[in-house]
Amino acid sequence: MRKVNVTCRMTEAQVALLDKLGAHFDRDRSYLVNQAVAGFLSMHQWQIEETQRAVAEADAGEFATDGEVREAFRKLRK
């Protein structure tokens, strides 16, 4: 996969911590930032997929009944 450069602004404290972690793990800033971004994207990918699924269900007219909603809230209150 082709890589592209991305620029972001960070505080001096964040950069110092990246450098400290980089020295500890024998990795450069770029590697650490890539790992952090990859983790963030992976962790939140489900949100995108679930939102798309929910929109498709809503477009198809698939909604929870009033009883199903009440039951879900009853379970949450326990």
Image: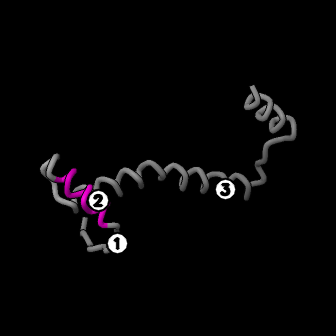
Closer-to-camera residue (12/10): 12
Characterize the magenta stretch by its predominant secondary structure: helix
For label 1, count other residues whose C-alpha is less than 10 Å away and answer few (under 14), some (14-19) or many (20+).
few
Q: Earlier in the sequence, mark 1 or mark 2?
A: 1
Q: Residue furthest front?
A: 13
The amino acid type of the residue labelled 3 equals Ala
Q: Residue at 47% across / 52% down in the picture? A: 45
Residue drawn where x is 58% and y is 50% of the image? 50
Quadrant where the image shows the C terminus: top right
Do the numbered discs 1 and 2 sit on residues whose CB atoms are within 8 Å?
yes
Query: According to the image, label 3 marks what residue?
Result: 56
Identify whether 43 is placed above or below 1: above
> Residue 76 colored magenta?
no
- The number of callouts visible is 3
Q: Amino acid at mark 2?
A: Val
Q: Nearer the viewer, residue 3 or 36?
A: 36
- Disc 1 target residue: 8
- Tell me the magenta residue range: 12-22
- Horizontally, is 35 left or right of 75 in the view? left
Q: Nearer the viewer, mark 2 or mark 3?
A: 2
Q: For the point 16% across and 47% down, which residue is it?
A: 25
Q: Which mark is residue 33?
A: 2
Picture quadrant where residue 16 is located? bottom left
Q: CA distance from mark 3 to mark 1?
A: 35 Å
